[in-house]
Amino acid sequence: MAASSARSGLTGRSMTEPATIYAAVEVRDLTRTFGARKALDRVSFDLPTGAFLSVFGPNGAGKTTLVKVLTTLTAPSKGTARVSGFDVVADAVELRSRIGLISHNPLLYPDLSAEENLAFFADMYGVADAGTRVRELLVAVELDHRRLDLVRTFSRGMLQRLSIARALLHGPEVLFLDEPYSGLDPHAVEILDSLIEQIRANHTFVMISHDLNKGLALCSHALILAKGKVVLSAPRTEIDENQFAATYRATVGMGVA
Amino acid sequence: MASEARGLGVRQFKAILRKDIVMELRTKEMITSMGIYALLTMVIYQVALSQSGTAFDPRNIAAGLLWLAFVFTSMLGLNRSLVHEKDQGCLEALLLSPVDRPVIFFSKAVGNLVFLLIVQVLTIPVFAFLFLQEGSYAGEWWMIPLALLAGSVGISGVGTLLATMSVNTKGKDFVLAVLFVPLMYPLLLAAVSATSAAVLGGDGSVQQFWTGMGMMAGFDAIMLLASFALYEFIVGA
Ligand SMILES: Nc1ncnc2c1ncn2[C@@H]1O[C@H](COP(=O)(O)OP(=O)(O)O)[C@@H](O)[C@H]1O
Ligand SMILES: [Mg+2]
């Protein structure tokens, strides 16, 4: 297959892929307990392919746990979740090659260079024509000039950009972002904005955000979690901003699960 | 499909092993800490044996002393092999990728084996210099590397397994230390017996050597099979 020629820029996938028929994310009565604590409590929602979901909620609401379950890093205690049509437990291996995660933790090796990091993950994902793909992404996230430098020497913004490149290497269908803006300076925020803008059209997004304005501006769907429960889940078009903000603020007082 | 998946598995195995070796060559974290620890153990042996007198022949306990040093060195060093993944959150990145969990185990275990063998190659000449008089070596020389390899495969495998368990457990080092010795007990007996036969030579030493080697091979095989079956569960805990 002429995999590399069919790739388009950042996405790594053909623009002409057939439309998919399944929902990108399907969550049913999802519960995850840690001992007696319910980090997720019967969470249910659907997200169509191509949507952008912003997840809000106070600290300890279960947002990261939700993303960990959806990315196969944590097993559900009860209920089911499917991403891109694949069950997070039964089809975990197939699912893993179709998703990408950008978290506040860069998930990169400090003692490897930027290029070595990407080459390593290209091997892990079995990316074809890895050298070309790695260079393409380094250029796209504006780190080509630093490709030989150890990641240990990178600023927070540079780490975040490289971790975006890592998450996009294998052309994932669904991207998970866990507070991607936290700790970024204004310039890094601009670059992240423009990167998201560029890949927006052919990915489904699930983004955890603490910034109400930013999260609402980007999203097509919004979800508020508190104490592991869904407080609100709605398409962006049905959301009144003031009311949404009031609901969100009310949850912040509710404390952790 | 099956051969494609195997091809990817091999590519992932090489990538993890290469990455760990490159990073180790850069930081020298494990080799340095393990090497220094092993050498310090030699110093302590020297103190411990300083009052043993001229009638005492250290050759009789040489194999035991060597393996003791390697076991303690491994407990210290192998624990690092996954802690550095965990520290940076990189274990998540590994687990996120479509890699069969046993591939992670085998690449980590082989990396640890390489580091352990390097430490042994550095330690043994020092040990021989301090405790074995010239010409006192009576066995067959080729037995030594074989015994070291068979024992080290077991140590690296069990060490990698426990290191993975301990990154997911509080009181990390404690878990490793407590489980390591009981699990290693049969392997250590066989390793000391085979190595002793190699050092001392004499009647029946070849027989004793191969009995020890057989036991170590059995231990290694069981340990590898168990790891293959359990690793998914252990790493996901
Ligand atoms: N590995 C874990 N072990 C025990 N408790 C956990 C673990 N991960 C999360 N929790 C608990 O689950 C709850 C939800 O955590 P999390 O999903 O990280 O919240 P958020 O990302 O919304 O801040 C918290 O009370 C947290 O302490
Ligand atoms: Mg969180």
Image (tube, coloured by chain):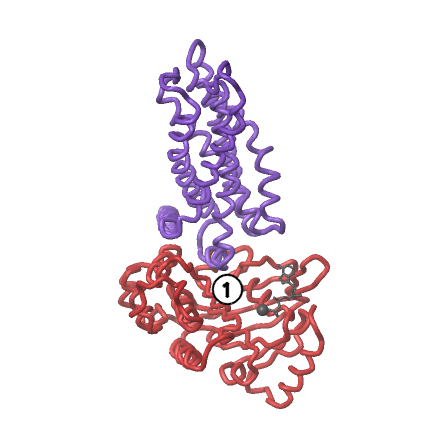
Chain colours: A red, B purple
**What residue sits 49% from the left and 73% below the top?**
A180
Question: Residue B149 lies in what quarter of the image?
Answer: top left
Task: Identify whether A207 is placed above or below B48.
Answer: below
In x, y percent, where is residue A61?
65, 71
**What residue sits 47% from the left and 47% below the top?**
B81
- In the picture, the quarter occupied by the N terminus of chain A is bottom left
Neighbours of disc 1 within 10 Å: few (<14), some (14-19), many (20+): some
Q: Can residue B153 be seen in this view?
A: yes
Left/right of residue A239 with respect to residue B218 in the rendered view: right
In the image, A100 versus A104, the foreground residue is A104
In the image, B1 versus B196, the foreground residue is B196
Residue sitting at the far top: B203
Task: Identify whether A231 is placed above or below B199.
Answer: below
Left/right of residue B129 with respect to residue A46 in the rendered view: left
In x, y percent, where is residue B105?
47, 45
Question: Residue A156 lies in what quarter of the image?
Answer: bottom left
In x, y percent, where is residue B45?
51, 29
In the image, A209 versus B212, the foreground residue is B212
**What residue sits 47% from the left and 28% below the top?**
B66
- In the picture, the quarter occupied by the C terminus of chain A is bottom right
Q: Is mark 1 on a helix, strand or loop?
A: loop
Tell me the kind of residue under disc 1.
Gly
Q: Ligand 1 appears in which quadrant? A: bottom right
Q: Does the residue labelled 1 lie within 8 Å of ligand 1?
A: no
Q: Which chain carries label 1?
A: A
- Look at mark 1 in the image and give the residue it sits on: A85
Number of numbered discs present?
A: 1
Task: Identify whether A151 is placed above or below B86.
Answer: below
Left/right of residue B58 with respect to residue B183 in the rendered view: left
In x, y percent, where is residue A173?
43, 68
Q: Can residue A16 be seen in this view?
A: no
